[in-house]
Image (cartoon, rainbow, N blue to C red):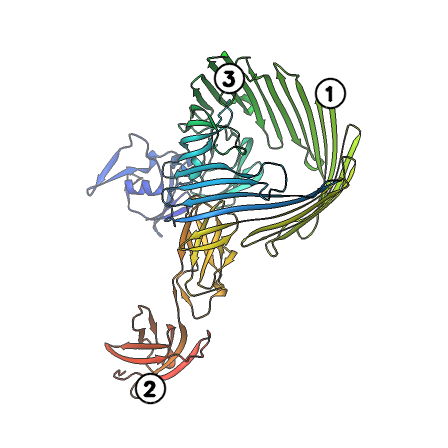
Amino acid sequence: MEAVINGSKVGTWPFVERQGQLYASKDAFEEWRVQLPAGTQSINVRGADYWLLAAVPGYTFKVNYSSQVVEITFAPEAFYTTKFTSELNSIKTSPVLPSAFVNYDLNLDTSKARQQAVQNNLGALVELGVSNDWGVLTSSQVGRNLAHSSANDSGWVRLESTFTRHMPESARTLRVGDAATRPGLWGSSVYFGGLQFGSNYSLTPGFITQPVPLVSGVSAAPSTVQLYVNDVLRKTSDVPAGPFVIDNLSGISGAGEAKLVVRDVLGREVVIVQPYFTNAQLLARGLDDWSVEAGALRENIGFQSNEYGSRFLSGTWRYGLNDRITVEGRGEFTRSTKTTGLGLVSALPFSLLGRVALVRSTDMKAGSGQKRVLGVERQWTDTSFYLQAQAASRHYVELGTSASTMPSRMEWAGSVSHQFGSMGTLGISLAGVRRYDESSVTTLGANYTIRVSKQTYLTASFNRALSSAPQTLFGLSITISLDSNRQLQTSASTTKGATDFYTTLTSAPNPETDLGWRMLGGRFQNEAHAEAGVDYGGRYGRVFSELSASSSQTTIRNGVAGGLVWAAGRPFLTKRVDQSFAIAEIKGYPDVGVGLGSNVTTRTDASGIALVPFLSPYQSNQIRLNATDLPISAEIESIEQIVVPRWRSGVKVEFPVRAGKAALLKIQLDDGEPAPAGAVVRIEGDKEEFYVARRGEAYVTALQPENVLSLTWKQQSCRFPVQIPPAANDDVIRIGPVRCAGVKR
C-alpha cells in the first residue's frame, strides 16, 4: 500500500496484517526514521521479518482499501532526531605557484617651521617575500632619513624576518624567525627570534572553537523552522516530523534568547523560546589550543636590526573540560627566571563569564613572587559589563621584564555600556593603577551617542584623570553622512581651559573612481590649523598627498604604496600583497575583465594574463571572467573557476579558449541538395562535433584561416576545405555553399 506518515507521502511499502494489526519491514522503519522500541517482537512471513507498528509510541492508522492507502501517525518523539550541523569537509588547497613579492611604502615629508630651514625626510617601509610549497619567507625593513637632509640617524633597519608554514590538514602553524609569543590569561606578548609551533584553527574556515548552543524542538508533521537569535532571523530550514536540533550557530557571544517558529504543512504554528550562553574565550568540550615558543627575546625592534637578549622557552595550553569550563596552563623559563601559572575561564550563574589565574615566579636575583588575575563579564542583547583586576607582589617577574623593574601592585579596569533604543547608547569606564615606586593613577570616562536624524549622530565624551594633578577633558562631536560616500564631522574638546575645535569633510574612495579626499579646518593648541589631502588607489597601488599648515609650521607629505609580484616568469604591478593572489590566463585575449565573483578587479594584458589580488587563503575563491569582454567567436567551457590558495601565495588559473572564427556553413551534396539535418561535422584535429540543421546549415566555431572539415551521415563521410576570409571580423560569417562529395541521402 501507499504509506502516508504523519501527513507526508513516503512511497509504496509491503505490509502484513494479522489479527487487525499491521506489521512492516525493518527497511520501512529506517526509511521513515522511526525508532523501534527495544524488545519489539517480529514475525516471519514468507522468509522475511516484520515488526509490529503498534509497538511505536503514539501509533494510529487508517486504511483505505479502495485506494490502497494507509495513513499512519506516530508520536513526534518516535522519530530519530534531525541534526543541522555544519559539515567541515577538508578543503584541498590548489597547487602553489612559486612566486616572489615586494611591498613598498615610500614617504617624503617636507616641513618648514617658523624661523627654521626647510627639512626633507624620505622614509621607506619595504617587505620582501617568497612563497612555494614549503611556506612563505618574509623580511621587512624600514628606512629613515634616506635623503640625509637632517641630523637625525639615517639608514636601514631590519624589522622582522620569518618563515611561516601553515598545515591546514592538522590546524598547526610553524614559524621560524621573528614572531610574538601568545600571552594567555596572564602573560604579555613579547617579540622574539626563534621557533614557534602551535595550533591554528583559523586555517579551517567555519570551524567553531567555542561551545555552540543547541537549539532544539519537535515537529509533529513536516514543517518549516525559522530560527531567530535576539529577534534577528538567522536560519530557515525544512524539517521532517520528529525532534530536531540546530547546533551550527556561529558568530554569537554572550547571553541571549533563541526563538524557534515551527510552522507545519497545515499552517499550524508553534513558538519555542530558549535562552543561551556562549563566549569565544571558552573552548568546546575536548578541544585543546596550544603554542610553544623557544628562542631569544628581541630588543629595540625598529631601532636595531639584530639585537637579541636572553634565551627563553615558553608554552601555553588550553583545554575545554566541558562546554562551561576551560582550563589553561602556561610556563615561561629563562636561565635565571621561572614563571608558571594556572588559569580558568568558566561560565557562571546569571550568564556571567569568569576568569581567574594564579601565577608564581622565581628569579635568582629578585626571589619569589606571585600574581593573581580575577575578571568577570557579561554580554546582554543591549548591555555589556566588564571588570578585571590583577595584583602582583613586589618581586614578581615575567617574560619581557627584568628583576630591576618593579611590577604594578594592582591594575584594574571596569566598564559598562547600555543601548537605550532610540535614546542612544551610554558607556562608562573606570580604570586604575597602583604602583610600588610611583604615584597611582585612576581614570574615569563616559561617552554618550545618539542618532539625531537618519544621517546625523551626536557624541559626547568625558574623561578625568584622578591623580595628584587631576585633568578633565570634555568632548562633543556631530557626524553627518552625506551622499556619494561623503561625511561631515564637527568636533570640539576642552581641557585645562583650552579649547580645540575642527571641522572635517571626507570623501571616501569609491569603486568607480578610487579617488578620495579630505579637508580639515579648526584650531589646535591655540593655533589656527588646516589640513587637506587627496588619495588615489588604483590597480597598481596607492598615491597620496597631504598638506598640513598652522601658524608655526607647514608640512607637505607625499607618498606611494603598492606591490610587485614575480610569478609565472614575469612581473606584475599590483596593490600591497597582504593576502593571496591568482595569476589568471586567457591566452591570446587582452583587455578581458577578471575578478572575484562579479567584482571585476583587473584586466588581462596584451598576452591575456592578469593578476587577481585579495584572495582569501584556505577558502574557496571564485575567479570569474567578464563574459561580455570575450568576442562572440570565443568558446570557453566555463567563465568561472574555484581555487583555494595558501596564505600569501599564488595560484595559476587557466581558462582554455577554443580560439578562431565562427561561421555558418551551407553544405551541399553531389546532387545539389542541402546536407541532411542531423549529419555530424568535425574540424580535423578538433574533438568538437557540430550538427547540420535545416537547409544544410551548420554553425561551426574555432575555425582557422585554413581548415579541413569532414561530414558523416549514415556511415558515409566526405572531406572538404574551408577558408576564412582574411578581413573577417568577430561577427558570425556565412560561407557556402560548399560541396560534400561522396555522401548520398
Vertical order, 241 against 403 (above or below): below
Estimate the x, y position of residue 219 in percent, counting from the top left: 46, 39
Which element carries disc 2, helix, strand or loop?
loop
- Which mark is on residue 397? 3
Judging by the rendered image, the residue that carries numbered circle 2 is 673
User: Which is nearer the eye, 230 or 479?
Assistant: 479
Q: Does the image show residue 85?
A: no
Which numbered dot is residue 36?
A: none
Mark 3 or mark 2, which has the lower sequence index? 3
Identify the residue shown where x is 63% and y is 16%. 434
Query: Of circles 2 and 1, which is in front?
Result: 1
Which residue, as the protein is rendered here, is positioned at the far right?
497
Q: Are circles 3 and 2 on residues that touch, CB within 8 Å?
A: no
Q: Is disc 3 placed on a helix, strand or loop?
A: loop
Identity of the residue drawn at 64% across and 20% down: 432
Residue 635 screen position, x and y as percent: 40, 67
- Quadrant of image for the C terminus: bottom left
Residue pointed to by mark 1? 469
Query: Which amino acid does the dot numbered 1 rest on?
Result: Ala
